[in-house]
Amino acid sequence: MFRLPRRHAIASALALAVCASSVFAQTGWPSRPLKLVVGFPAGSSPDLMARTIAEPLSQALGQPVIVENKAGAGGNIGADAVARATDDHTLGLMINGNLTIAKILNPATTYDPLKDLQPVSLLAVSPLVLAVPAAQAASGKAFFDAARAQGDKLNYGTPGVGTVAHLGMELLKSKAGISPVHVPYPGNPQVITGLIGGQVQMALLPPGLALAQVRGGKLKAIGVTSAGRSSVAPDLPSLSEAGVAGLQLEIWNAVAAPVGLPKAHVQKLATLLAEIVRRPDIREKILNQGWQVAGTSPEGLAKRIAADTAAMAEVIRKNDIKPN
């Protein structure tokens, strides 16, 4: 009977052990409840997204998925908690800024999104809606013509310095040739109040917030910031249809993990999350929350992070934007 030399037999045994260990890592994880950290309060858009995916993800993994809210600093407190986790059972549901320009905007940020976190999956995306008071010009072209004529006599509202709404409006200003002045508010509810009251004349708002006010006749929607029309608001034109060329801006929610989480676990999560968000019942829930499903691979999210980081970093540098 043929026998391997001893050194070959040992090498083969080691190889088999490594393979067995890899299989166990993929099938034996998670071994206890997973924690899904959200850097925003209960009832916020990221929180709703997290709770939408938590139950089906728990069913798929065979372990509870517990949503934990660590609100503050635009989601960066939660992101930092994920970056510091070493238990292999902590994930984060994050927004654009937490995974892109957090450190660029504020060098004092305690984590580096590109070094301390790794992408898992881009869950869903949404354009912003350019909303104006209900009495404003009926068409996008008329609105922009009037805004150019009024220069810095107009104001725009955002939920704070460095938010996607703020950076997006600065990008819109450069693309559309308008120059309204920034007025930061504590949050989007106050921005909407400012719009209705006439303290600000425009704002970029999430569709879920803007469309309710538009349907109620309190605001008017000029268009959306996606390259074309969006399934989230199919009746609204893109701003390119109003003559603003080259503008493409979306907000998004994604799942990220500590950089030390093994790649096998990350891939397993990404595959499951993509399947979950594409389920018809989950897709409908997410659409009703104002989002269009994505469900990417880790590589797909990494590409999106790189592209958005480059675009928004340029806006920050060009406008010398500093944190509050």
Image (tube, rainbow, N blue to C red):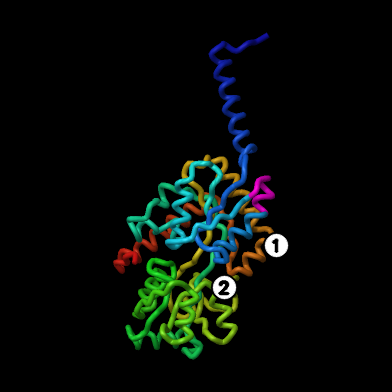
Label tally? 2
Compared with 61, 286 (above or below) is below
Residue 273, percent from left and from top:
61, 52
Classify residue 188 as left or right of residue 283: left
Q: CA distance from mark 2 to mark 1?
A: 19 Å
Using the image, determine if residue 182 lies above or below residue 63. below
Tell me where residue 24 sits by quadrant.
Answer: top right
Q: Position of residue 173 (x, y in %)?
A: 37, 76
Residue drawn where x is 29% and y is 66% of the image: 320
Q: Residue at x 56, y 22 (%)?
A: 14
Magenta: main secondary structure: helix
Q: Which residues are the magenta region?
A: 56-64
Label 2 is placed on what type of residue?
A: Gly
Q: Determine the residue positioned at 62% across, 29% down.
A: 20
Q: Which mark is residue 281?
A: 1
Which circle's residue, 2 or 1, is located before the other in the chain?
2
Percent across and percent down for residue 147 are: 38, 85
Q: Secondary structure at mark 1?
A: helix
Circle 2 sits on which residue?
Answer: 208
Compared to residue 143, the image places residue 167 above or below, namely above
